[in-house]
Image (tube, rainbow, N blue to C red):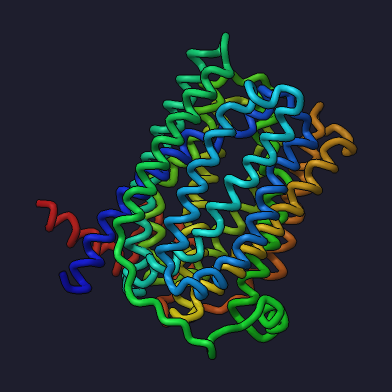
Amino acid sequence: MNKPSRIKRSLKFSLWDGIFASGMAGLITDYITPYALTLKATSSQIGFLSAAPNLTSSVAQLRSADLTEKFKSRKKIINTFVLLHTLMLLPIIFIPYLFKAQPVLFLIIFITLFNSLNALAIPAWSSLMSDYIPYRMRGKYFGWRSKIMVAVAILSAFLAGFILHHFKDNILKGFVIIFGLAFVARLISWYFLTRMYEPRFKVNPDSYFSFFDFIKRIRESNFAKFVIFVALLNFCVNLAAPFFSVLMIRDLKFNYLIYTIVVTCVSISQIFTIDRWGRHADKVGNVKVLKFTSLIIASLPLWWIINHSPLYLVFIQILSGFAWSGFNLCTTNFIYDAVRPEKRTRCIAYFSACSGVALCLGALLGGYLVNILPSLFGYKILSLFLISTILRFLVVSLFSGKISEVRKTEKISSKDLFYSVIGLKPMLGIAQESRQIVRKEE
């Protein structure tokens, strides 16, 4: 089988891997905090539950590039650590039964290991996938792929919500079921990863640079400035992010069905926008999308202060999904565009490490502040949301303008970009492409 055929076959396996990995994520991602609250976690412990995995994942990803170069195979790294990541779900499932004395402590430990093992595989996987897709098609392809992944995650999240609602009188049994299903889904995902083809991986000693070499180049390196911008924004985001679930479940007393509907609206919004962001980013550039969406992201906690009606929060979550889908997609694609293939694994690792440390520090500070801040409209968490909003806008205003696009792109105003993404005023190139797609379908 020739190389193009192997890559085409691997992309099919990658799709199935993504489907089952997204199934796992939908079953557990938005339910870790509710699980911790069921185990009687405090606000500070919720902060640690977010902080510790991000910190250790950052350290792990710093080693990922070295391990990949040592074994001269991205596939070995991916398969080994994804399997270990999958097996770590087993002790998480049985925490209430095996670790009754300190269940929250052991949840933090096992979730930390769970995330860290997966983190070791991410740079290698990202590097492998970027070899499969030509740069002019990355936005379109990953937008399409992500759309499918998000749809699966939504269905899985709703399934988890219904299971927890059904077992509300025996909630621990509900968590055992959804985490057990997540284990099976990730195991199937791992199987498809083992079937993927790895193009020859070349280790070029001249392309090596240490993490400290990377930090030294912050002032002159466009990529380093991009990393600092995303890391600082992540710090500000994670001041508040771990506590949205706490506000809904503990303070606002949402049941699991309402909670599930609110949190999955982010993903539902992404289904309708992420591939559109991908097509637009291919034409107007990733940086344009990053700057535009980061302004919306900065405003998000503020909207939670104004009103707590579930129907209102649904609309805010739709706005959140719209912005985060574009931001996350273009963050990844900017790395693929800005970094040469031989340096890509290491740059992804360093980027992830910086972001992870920022997320950790944000969660730790948020966990500390939420206990000492004065109440705002009756809730200390809302004071934390206000601080997060102010700092997000400060970071966006100071740093987003320092990043430059790395390829030729079309010029467009932010207003026209918004109208085009939502379909009110399509760009010429996007409109022509859409008509071609319609004709092919007909």
Percent coordinates x, y for residue 265 in the rendering: 48, 36
- Residue placed at 52% from the left, 47% from the top? 85
Percent coordinates x, y for residue 194 in the rendering: 34, 55
In the picture, which quadrant includes the N terminus? bottom left
In the depicted structure, whether residue 207 falls above or below residue 324: below
- Quadrant in the picture for residue 434: bottom left
Percent coordinates x, y for residue 259 in the rendering: 56, 26
Q: Is residue 197 left or right of residue 436?
A: right
In the depicted structure, whether residue 154 falls above or below residue 209: above
Q: Is residue 173 left or right of residue 198?
A: right
- Residue placed at 54% from the left, 64% from the top? 290
In the depicted structure, whether residue 327 falls above or below residue 217: above
- Residue placed at 85% from the left, 42% from the top? 369
Total numbered labels placed on residues in the image: 0
- Quadrant in the picture for residue 34: top right
- Quadrant in the picture for residue 386: top right
Q: Is residue 13 left or right of residue 379?
A: left
Percent coordinates x, y for residue 101 in the rendering: 76, 24
In the displayed image of the protein, which residue is found farthest to the left? 442
Between residue 107 and residue 28, name the one nearer to us: 107
In the displayed image of the protein, which residue is found farthest to the top? 169
- Residue placed at 43% from the left, 30% from the top? 181
In the displayed image of the protein, which residue is found farthest to the bottom? 206
In the depicted structure, whether residue 228 falls above or below residue 48: below
Between residue 110 and residue 258, name the one nearer to us: 110
